[in-house]
């Protein structure tokens, strides 16, 4: 029988040591608590994130290994440059956060549901209003064709989800995010749980102890609080080549 710690609702910043998360299921650490901004920011600063389905209790995770992107390594390759030469896309930041979350939560082929339940969407929308959650949007005219959203804690960006409505839409959003973060010395994008698609995009895996050491350092550095809407990280991706 699995015995998980129950989070104390009176101590939103307190979590069990993430190094003590279960091996099976990989990374399951605790349950309960809430999705308040204070608790969510404390969780991400400790290498922990919520992940649960609508019919489950609120579950908290810190898997081993951890999937991450190095922002310095995320640059468009030849195939992406060819793709961008065929389209007229523009990139914005924090212009349509709710639309990106809704698109990420929409049913996908082969999936019967989504982990971005209404309570999760509401919590991250609240964080966005506070200047902690951000989105990158990819547009074709006025149609949203790709995007990504996540949480910034210090100089760590914790990616939550991304989507594509056109080929390479999410990849362009990811590249745009990486370019913007490089300007601010954010070295990592936490991608949480490894899958084949993330590895294909350039993600790598770190043992949990090493990842947690990096989180401890990055989460306490000065970041970029507030709206990022004035920034345009990928106005001319094909021209810049980076």
Image: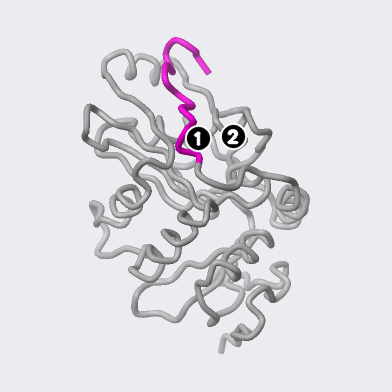
Tell me the colour scheme of the image: one colour
Q: Residue furthest top?
A: 239
The residue at 52%/72% (across/down) is 36
Percent position of residue 112, x then y: 24, 64
Marks 2 and 1: in contact by CB < 8 Å? yes
Badge 1 density bin: few <14, some 14–19, many ≥20, Cα 10 Å: many
Q: Nearer the viewer, residue 162 or 28?
A: 162
Left or right: 180 with respect to 89?
right
Percent position of residue 86, x then y: 27, 15
Q: Does dot 1 land on a helix, a strand or a loop?
A: helix
Q: Name the quadrant of the N terminus.
A: bottom right
**Real-space Cα separation, disc 1 to disc 2, in angstroms:** 6 Å
Percent position of residue 151, x then y: 54, 52
Left or right: 187 with respect to 175?
right
Badge 2 density bin: few <14, some 14–19, many ≥20, Cα 10 Å: many
Please state the extent of the stretch shown in magenta in the rendering: 228-242
The residue at 32%/13% (across/down) is 85
> Is the residue 66 above or below the residue 52 in the image?
above
The residue at 48%/47% (across/down) is 134
Which residue is under mark 1?
A: 177
Which residue is under mark 2?
A: 181
The residue at 47%/21% (across/down) is 76
Q: Nearer the viewer, residue 193 or 129?
A: 129
In this figure, what is the number of numbered marks?
2
> Is the residue 67 above or below the residue 41 in the image?
above
Percent position of residue 65, x then y: 63, 54
Whether residue 237 is in magenta: the answer is yes
Whether residue 233 is in magenta: the answer is yes
């Amino acid at each position: 029988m699995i015995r998980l710690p129950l989070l104390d609702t009176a101590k939103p910043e307190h979590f069990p040591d993430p190094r003590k998360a279960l091996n099976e299921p990989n990374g399951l650490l605790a349950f309960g608590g809430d999705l308040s901004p204070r608790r969510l920011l404390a969780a991400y600063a400790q290498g922990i994130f919520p992940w649960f389905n609508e019919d489950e209790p609120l579950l908290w995770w810190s898997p081993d290994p951890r999937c991450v992107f190095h922002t310095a390594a995320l640059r468009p390759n030849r195939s992406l440059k060819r793709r961008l030469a065929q389209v007229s896309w523009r990139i914005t930041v924090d212009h349509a956060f709710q639309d990106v979350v809704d698109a990420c939560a929409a049913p996908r082929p082969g999936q019967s549901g989504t982990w971005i339940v209404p309570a999760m969407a509401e919590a991250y929308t609240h964080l966005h209003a506070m200047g902690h959650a951000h989105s990158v949007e990819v547009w074709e005219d006025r149609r949203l064709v790709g995007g990504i959203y996540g949480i910034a804690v210090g100089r760590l960006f914790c990616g939550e989800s991304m989507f594509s409505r056109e080929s390479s839409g999410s990849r362009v959003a990811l590249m745009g995010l990486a370019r913007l973060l490089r300007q601010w010395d954010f070295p990592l994008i936490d991608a949480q749980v490894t899958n084949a698609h993330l590895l294909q995009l350039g993600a790598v895996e770190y043992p949990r102890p090493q990842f947690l050491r990096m989180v401890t350092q990055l989460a306490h550095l000065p970041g970029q609080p507030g709206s990022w809407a004035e920034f345009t990280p990928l106005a001319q991706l094909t021209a810049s080549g980076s």
